[in-house]
Image: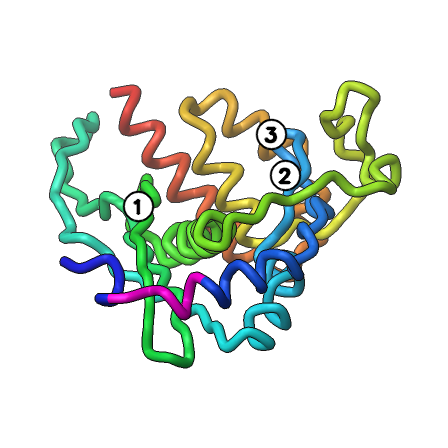
Amino acid sequence: MPRQSESIANLAVALVKAQSQIEPPRKESTNTYRGWKYADLTAVWEACRKPLQDNGLAVVQTARVPEFHPRTIHAKEGDETVFDAPGVILETTLMHTSGEWITGELYMPATDATLERHGAAVGYARRIALLALLGIAPVDDDEGESFGQSGNGRSADHKGSKALSLDIAVGDMDAITDLKSLLSYWNKFSKDINASPDKAEIVKHFQARRKTLEGARK
């Protein structure tokens, strides 16, 4: 499959100009479980949208899910067959008004087939792919202390009750690979989860993730 148009001469010139105008997005969001800051998708788009438009460039991102594969969970009540998606494939295409284009694909693993997990996977993939395609990198926020950043460059413990977004909660839980750590995460951020407008979906994903990890232990 072709990864670019026959010529990208005009696109290359436009991208060079756009890159010289793009200000690095700031790392103003915090991953509550892993304890680091990152530039979310909104911040990345705010940084690059106008420079792209001013130079006749546009980005299109489309996602597809590979075939579902069955696997067997061995439980006390008997074997159970479940269908897990292996992940999400995101295709990011940079287009120029001349008709020239370049494209790339990014595979993002998924641990289960829930809509929440795939939505979170697409969100993560869109941000990472956009940064890579445009050749830009986020920078630390100058007001790092206001986000709980400690002197070693990592965020300090999450303090106080703060609404936890669905994509962050799903990403956090899917990064956990054992049941004990999942339960610890749930207890640590229970106030944040209760304050979230996405509480019902977060609880649903927690229950699905817990079931997956319990099945892995048997």
Main SS of the magenta part reads helix
Residue 186 coordinates in the image, percent (x, y): 59, 34
Q: Distance between the Cα atoms at labels 2 and 1?
A: 21 Å
Which residue is labeled 1 in the image? 107
Q: Looking at the rendered structure, which numbered label has been put on residue 34? A: 3
Amino acid at the residue labelled 1:
Tyr
Number of numbered discs visible in the structure rendering? 3
Label 3 environment density (alpha carbons within 10 Å; few <14, some 14–19, many ≥20) = few
Of the 4 image quadrants, the one containing the C terminus is: top left
Q: How is the image coloured?
A: rainbow
Instruction: Specify which label sits upstream in the sequence, 1 or 3.
Output: 3
Q: Residues within 10 Å of mark 1 (few under 14, many from 20)?
A: some
Q: Is residue 203 visible?
A: no
Image coords of residue 105 (percent x, y):
30, 52
Q: Residue at x 22, y 66 (%)?
A: 6
Residue at the image position 82 percent from the left and 34 percent from the top = 148
Residue 61: image quadrant is bottom left
Q: Is label 2 in contact with label 3 (beta carbons under 8 Å)? A: yes
Question: Depth check: 52 or 8 in front?
Answer: 8
Up/down of 17 relative to 206, above or below: below
Whether residue 164 is visible, yes or no, is yes
